Amino acid sequence: MKNSSIARIFQDMADLLELKGENIFKIRAYRRAAQVIEHLPQEMEVMREQGEDFQRIPGIGEAIAKKATELITTGKLEAYETLKAEFPDGILELMEIPGIGPKTAYRLATELMITSVEKLEQAITEGKVAELFRMGDRTAQNLLRQIQSMRRKDQRVPIGEVLPVVEDILEMLRRHPKVKNMTSAGSLRRFRETVGDIDIMGTADDPESVINAFVTFPQVKEVIAKGPTKASVILLPGFQADLRMVEHDSFGSLLQYFTGSKQHNIILRTKAQKKGLKLSDYGITDTTTEVLEKFSTEEGFYHRLGLQYIPPEIREDQGEIELAEAHAIPDIINPEDVMSDLHVHSNWSDGADSIEDMALWAKNLGYRYIAITDHSRGRGIARGLTEERLMRQIQEIHRLNQNLKGIRILSGIEVDIRADGSLDMPDRILAGLDIVIAAVHSSFNQSQEKMTRRIISAIENPHVDVIGHPTCRLIGEREPTEVDMETIFNAAVNHRKALEINAMPDRLDLKDIHVYRARELGAMFAIGTDAHNRGQLTLMRFGVGIARRGWCEKKHVLNCMSFEEIMTFTRR
């Protein structure tokens, strides 16, 4: 059984235990275990075969470890089946719908005998849900919209396709003379690698005029719903976007609520309840006095709960709330911290622009240096460099460094790691470069053992500085290679080699959970756009987003170092 399935079962158990009114610490233990297991860099099946003790995993206690072992060995969990039998059929499926908590799901299942999303949709259409006590037509119609939205969200879109469209819309909205605040929320703001529907939040002196402008934008294909403060549309790429406007003094509460994640907000709500507070998208209510306190900023919202502000990218219930209580949230990397791009191609191989053009564009972006890392000769399709052409390129880079002001060019290469682990360029050549990226570009179907050994061979080479796009995945096109990531991470740490966060939107490799784990083990990272033309240099933000989701600080990322510091790291 895969980690994702094990995590899903533990999450379901937490939901059902909450419905039973079980001990909050027990519920939290299951939720925490689900989060930890889902983000493990290695399948628990493999870990068990290797004789690893699950209790050594932070957040996994003896009881959870035994249950995980039972799931792996038998494919089922007796405690889970027993717990499910205490509840009506379909209740877990109902709880998957946003807006339906455990108590509402229980009412729908017991009072209306609803056992599936399809039956709920039918009951709403027939008016049965609206007739339930304290439900009403408005709530029923909201649930219907959530069902329709959830179906569209099953078709998640890579963030690289979504973000440019949303940024265009945000730019147009912000130009509206009445707008004061406007930003995206949800998984896009948390910088998940794939996104479902788009949530946009804002405030304005005349909200209805902003709504009217939004639904007429050229990117809008269809208007689903429109009111004075809310609108839902289908954008031309095919995904849904929802705009919600609130009063200025409620913007912080709204943004926090709709940014999520679900688990992050559940833990916040639980902690608030212990303090006699109730959280909502309108603000924080004192349950004793019923006084609602509004917040214009997220910072104020978190501070009211006694917490340090938590950046959106790390709101995933990975211990961030406990750190915020101790005011110990790390100062994670920001885009302005980046001083370089460490993976760039030119027209010497398969790039479109000259080295000089790439360098000048990098300078315009505020970078202090840039690494030219064209392909080695093994990439014939990419016009890879022979030894002779690489030496000529080094001379060209030296010449440009003498003439260009305000930017320095590093001589480098993206050298192929052959199927047997050897490199597609002799050591005597690699030794003369400023930076060497080693990467796999062929024989992707090797066994885990062979692929792991192959990459470790490159890590052990004294002239290699960075392992490029370590899992070789292409989102939606090519699955990651079979590789023991934990072993790779440890080898990189032991040999002082950096792991790449490839910022190309169809790669994002390493992905966030790998970055998080590798950082825990002490790894260093190099963010590279893998740019093949000048415009792609702006893709750095995608790499920074993944680094932020992995809790990286400036000290973890080579791009935030000076030239001298990088040369010290690479021993050049």
Image (spheres, grey):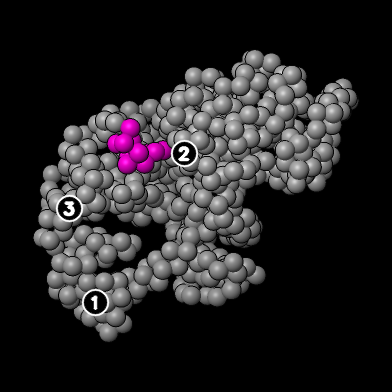
Contact between marks 3 and 2 (CB within 8 A): the answer is: no
**Number of residue marks:** 3
Looking at the image, which residue is at 58% across and 39% down? 469
| Residue position for label 1 | 129
**In this image, 206 relative to 413: left or right?**
left
Would residue 307 be counted in the magenta stretch?
no
| Residue 235, numbered circle | none
| Residue position for label 3 | 80
| Circle nearer the N terminus (3, 2) | 3
Quarter holding residue 116: bottom left
| Circle nearer the N terminus (1, 2) | 1
| Circle nearer the N terminus (1, 3) | 3
x%, y% of residue 472? Answer: 57, 43
Looking at the image, which residue is at 75% across and 46% down? 381
Estimate how packed mark 1 is, as few (under 14), some (14 to 19) or many (20 or more) residues with alpha carbons within 10 Å.
many
507, 206: nearer the viewer: 507
| Residue position for label 2 | 448
**Helix or strand or loop: what does disc 3 sit on?**
helix
Looking at the image, which residue is at 56% across and 65% down? 210
x%, y% of residue 61? Answer: 21, 34
Contact between marks 1 and 2 (CB within 8 A): the answer is: no
514, 461: nearer the viewer: 461
Residue type highlighted by circle 3? Tyr
x%, y% of residue 175? Answer: 64, 57
Part of the protein shown in magenta:
40-50
